[in-house]
Every structure is written in structure tokens, then in C-alpha cells.
Amino acid sequence: MIDLRNMLEGTLFELKMVRLYWPYILIINILLPSSYLMIVLFSTYGSQEAVKIALTGFLVISSFSILIYTIGHRIGNLFEDEVLELVASLPISFQELILSIILSYVILSLPAVLASIIGLIAAAGITRPLLMVTGLLFMYAVSIISGVITGLSVRNVRKLDPLLQVLVFLAIIFTPAFYEIPDNIYVIPLVANPLTHVVVLLRAGIGIASTITTIISLTYLIVIMSLSIVFILHFMRRPLFTIIEKK
């Protein structure tokens, strides 16, 4: 059973710890997303349609890069020997600690995400708000779950750093974030990427149709997120985690 009080106390503790490495948070949350945005806006050449496409892409890529990197890195850090010993002695379960980490970095990601949403609304407006909200929820779900699975699977900060950078780079390449979704054979590798379907929902929310229908995107995201949650719950039952909980 998750204790909400423990989780909130863990979140406050995590937010206090951010002060120890604020330059890192500043780079991930502000400088990197801002550099993406500047490059994208300069490449649109004033086209209204291109600006809409670029802003939805920026929203997806910036939130994904912020959350997968910070959550994945922080969860991986929990498995360092000295940190693991500390975790085992804390009056908080491992599950509550992971939820605290997720909540902390969701809070820290809000300024960049809200700025992106405001810019998108100002530039494009929202024609289908329900799809927009659904897209935003799935955007957070995909980013958070990706970070959790990566951190739990690798469990080594030295290996995680280059891996997370590669994952963010691949996300930029294989997500139609800054261009329209093609209607030819090149769409095949994009369809397997959950972020592609998040882009479809967000663009549908501002009135931009894609070659992939919203029904297909919703179905794919529901299935892939459900399987991912089952995987995480199964993973947390492995001997290492039960030993930590017993301690």
C-alpha cells in the first residue's frame, strides 16, 4: 500500500536535493528546450502551418528529453551501493521513493511544458480540446514510463548517461516532431514509436490532420502503456526489490 504522506515527504526531500545540482537542472529544463525552440522557429521561415508543427514537436521532444533524462538518471542512481544502503534504511518503500522522484521531476518540468502550451495556444489555438488534453496526458505517460523502465533496467549511472543521450537523439530522429508524417514506406519505423502517436493527438487538437488516424494512435498508446505498466510491476517483484522492502 502506498502511503501518500511518505510519498509527499519524499517529494519535498527530492526537491530540496535539486539545490545540490541546480546547474544540471537548469541545462536540462531551460537551456536545451530553448535551443530546440530557437532552431525550430528559425527553420519555419514564417509559415503558419510550419510554426504549428514545430511547436507541437518542441512540446513533445522537450518534455520527453527532460523527463526521461532526469527520472531515468535519478532512479539509476538509487542502485549505487552507498545509496542503496541508505534507501534500505529509510522509512519509505522503494515504490513510494520512485513515485516521489516522478512527482518531483514532473513539477520541475512544468515551466518549460506550460510555456510551450501557452505558445502553442497563442500561435495555433485549440480546435479539439479533448484530444489536446489526451495528447498531453499520454505525452507525460510515455516520457515518465520510458524513464522508469530505463532506470530500473540499467541501474548504473555511468552506463545510463550515454544511453539516455542516445535515446533522446533517437527520439528526435524517429519522431515526426519537426516535420509532417509521411504517407509512404518511411512511416513504418515511425509508427512503432509511441511519441509519434502523441504528436498525432496534439496536432489533431489544433486542427492538423495526419496520415495516422487518432483512433489508431489512441489504441496503440493504450496498449503499449498498459504493457509497460505490467512490465514495471513485474520487474519490481524481482528478488532485489523484495530484499530492499524486507529490510
Image (cartoon, helix red, strand yellow):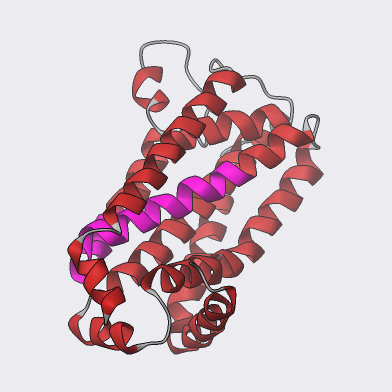
Q: Residue at x 55, y 67 (%)?
A: 103
Q: Quadrant of the C terminus?
A: bottom left
Q: Point out residue 176 in the picture as x, y percentages from the top left corner.
A: 48, 31
Q: Is residue 201 visible?
A: yes
Q: Which residues are magenta?
A: 137-165
Q: Would you say 207 lies left or right of 93 here?
A: right
In the drawing, does residue 50 fall left or right of residue 78?
right
Q: Residue drawn 46% across and 54% down?
A: 144
Counting labels gives 0
- Confirm whether residue 40 shows in the render: no
Q: Is residue 174 left or right of residue 202?
A: left
Q: Nearer the viewer, residue 29 or 226?
A: 226
Tell me residue 23's x, y (percent): 46, 80
| Location of residue 113 with respect to 155 vertically, above or below | above
Q: Residue at x 41, y 24 (%)?
A: 191
Q: Give the residue at x 27% y 77%.
A: 246
Q: Nearer the viewer, residue 202 or 76?
A: 76
Residue 18 in the image: state x and y as whole percent.
48, 83
Give how far across and how far down residue 55 sits, in percent.
Answer: 63, 42
Relative to 207, is 247 above or below?
below
The correct choice, above or below, for 134 with respect to 188 in the image is below
- In terms of secondary structure, what is the magenta stretch mainly? helix
